[in-house]
Image (cartoon, helix red, strand yellow):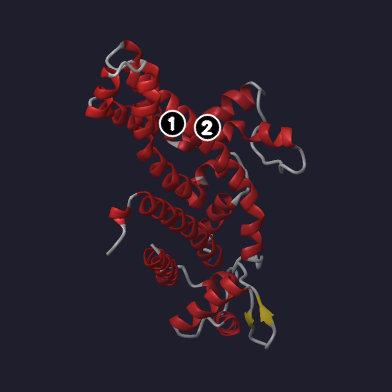
Amino acid sequence: MLVFIIRRLIGMVAVLFAVSLLVFGVFILLPGGDPAQRMAGKNPTPENIHNIREQWGFDKPFYVQYARMMQKAFTGLTPGPHNEYDILRSFDTRQDVVHEIVKGIPATMSLCIGAAIIWLFFGIVVGVISAVTAGTASDRLITILALVGISMPVFWLGIVMRFFFAETNTWFPDGGYVPLTTDPWQWCYHLIMPWFCLAVLFIGFYGRVLRSNMLDSMGEDYVRTARAKGLPPRAVLKRHVLRNSLIPIVTLFGLDFAAVLGGGAILTETVFDLKGVGWYAAQSVGGLDLPPIMGVTLYGAFFIVFFSAVVDFLYAYLDPRVRPA
């Protein structure tokens, strides 16, 4: 087990390195990706661009620029052009990238955790009801609603919700984020619409997956044996069918939560103006600002590979057959 954990941790480091190298290389090679030209402003002279390129080290080889940016991102400091220490700063706004990401984490965490609780709870409820009533009118209605929820883009649903529930009828605030430590009620009140907007897609998907798993489990021998022993239908459903059917749901939840936390909430944060890490990423991508994009990408990749490793560790612990020899 220890060898498996060490191999998985080495794989995490390798994935983060590959992601950072790929993002850095793509943005360096993009047309208009030269940060010196953007930093020089409108109608710059070649001398201005040259001076900025020398001052910021953009004239150095690719691997030198990459190493300096990674040093800034992970240590926070690296020697500057005049022997002072410089942090990882945005090329456009000159703001501290790590500070901006840390500042946006509470909003992103609040959005993702609340939405995850909602989609997991309602996804299980929808899946159980649909499986128990399989083939009936209620099952078909739930199937239609689930497909509608899966098909609706987040940005469109968010705009519609804001229009009907915040602008036409002022039932909820029209976007914005209030920190939990400032006012817990306003924190929850401002996040109700974003939570449900982000959760709708996953509710329908989880409901369909759980329904399929439960219907397969109902035909297994151990379920028929439990019924033959005279166990009540509710006990059979809870102890045997639902319990075994939730195993794939737990796996999906771990990976989906990591993906949402790592960047899947960008559109929701942008529509509802939550100013979390996703909102910061959207602003940076619009300006082709490499340091924030690099920082946010590493932030997202870390959560994805971390939760993926956690799921692998749990599976290896529960089932020794998946451990490498």
For the N terminus, the image quarter is bottom left
Answer whether residue 154 is visible to the viewer in this image: yes
Vertical placement of 154 versus 307: above or below?
above
Query: Is the C-beta separation of discs 1 and 2 under 8 Å?
Result: yes
Residue picked out by circle 1: 203
Residue picked out by circle 2: 118
Q: What element carries label 2?
A: helix
Q: Residue 312 lies in what quarter of the image?
A: bottom left
**In the rendering, at what x and y percent does residue 291 appear?**
55, 67
Foreground residue, 47 or 116?
116
Q: How crowded is mark 2: few (under 14 residues within 10 Å), some or many (20 or more)?
A: some
Q: Which amino acid does label 1 sit on?
A: Ile
Answer whether residue 43 is visible to the viewer in this image: no
Q: Is mark 1 on a helix, strand or loop?
A: helix
Q: Which amino acid does label 2 sit on?
A: Ile
Foreground residue, 119 or 98?
119
